[in-house]
Amino acid sequence: MPGFKGIFSFFFKGARRRSKNSEDRSENLVQLIKNEPGLIPENILNQVRADGKASISLLSALWPELSLEKRGQLWEVWQDEGLIDDLVKDLGSKYEEKHLTAAQILKEMKHEKLLIPLINALESSDQFVPARVAEVLLSYGKSGMNLILERLPDLSEDGKCLAISILEEFGDPGAVPALLEEFSHTSLKVRMKAVEALGEIGNQEITDAMIIMLQDQEWEVRSRAAKALGKIKDPRSIPALEKSLADETWWVRENVKDALKRIDAAGEDGQD
C-alpha cells in the first residue's frame, strides 16, 4: 500500500495534468475562434457553452480582434446561458477581486446591450459598487454619455447623483444643458451635484445660471455655486458675488471671497 507521500504525489500530479490540459484546451479554443475565417462553427460554440463564465474571461481580451459577427455569436451564447447577467451582478460582489475582474471584462467587451443594465445599476447603488459601474460606463465614451443624458430625467435621486458624477468625469460640454435642468430639482443632493459638475465642465456660458444658484435656499448649494464661479472666472459674476459677501453662512462667504480673488487674478493676468 503506498504511503502518504506516494498518495499525495499521485493526486498532485493528477491535478497538475488536469490544470495543464485545461490550459491547453483554453489556448486551443482561443486560437480556433481567432483563426476561424467565417462564423464560429457550432462545435466550437458548444465548447464555449461548456466552459461557462470562464469562456468570457478567456475571450474578452480577444474581443477587439473579433468580427462583429463572431462577437454576436458569442454574446448570444453567453446571454442564453445567463452569463452576462451574472457578470453584471458581479459588479456588486462584496469581494473586491470579483467586482474588479467583472469591471475589467465588461470594459474590454463594450457591448452596447450592456449599457441599459449598467444604467439600471445606477438605481441600485445598494446592490452594486458605484465606482465599478461608473468605471465601465466611462469606458463607453460618447455612447455611454449619451444614454446617461437620455435617462437622467427619469432617474431617482441617488441614481441622478451617481449619473451626474459620471457626467462630470466625462467632462464633455455636451452635458451642460441637461445638468442645467437639474438646477431646479427639489433634491438638495441633486442640485449640489449638478452645481459641482458644471463648475468643472462649464464655461462662461453658464455664468447667469450659476449666479441664480447663489440665491438658492440651501447654503450648501450657494457655497458650491460661489466655488464654481471662481473656477469659471467670468467678471460678469462680480456684482452678484460681492452681494453674497453678506451671506449668513461662513462657508458661502469664504468661497465668495476666494472666487473674487480668482477673478481678480485672472483679470490681472489678462492685462499682462
Image (spheres, rainbow, N blue to C red):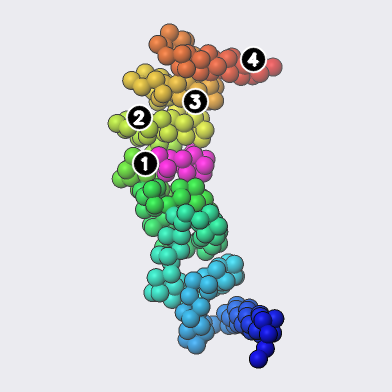
Specify the amino acid type for callout 4.
Glu
According to the image, label 1 marks what residue?
158
Circle 3 residue? 228
The answer to whether any part of residue 233 appears in the image is: yes
User: In this rendering, which labeled residue sits more in front, label 3 or label 1?
Assistant: 1
Tag 4 secondary structure: helix
- Secondary element type, mark 2: helix
Q: Residue at x 52, y 59 (%)?
A: 98
Separation of residues labelled 1 and 4 (CA atoms) = 42 Å
How many badges with numbers are in the image?
4
Q: Residue at x 33, y 20 (%)?
A: 217
Binning the other alpha carbons within 10 Å of mark 4 as few (below 14), some (14 to 19) or many (20 upward) gives few
Q: CA distance from mark 4 to mark 3?
A: 20 Å
**How far apart in space, not on screen, are marks 2 and 3 (Cα)?**
17 Å
Say whether residue 144 is visible. no
> CB under 8 Å between callouts 4 and 3?
no
Foreground mark, 2 or 4? 2
- Which residue matches tag 2? 188
The first of marks 2 and 1 along the sequence is: 1
Q: Nearer the viewer, residue 130 or 35?
A: 130
* Disc marking residue 268: 4
Question: On screen, 20 above or below 257?
Answer: below
Q: Which residues are magenta?
A: 161-174
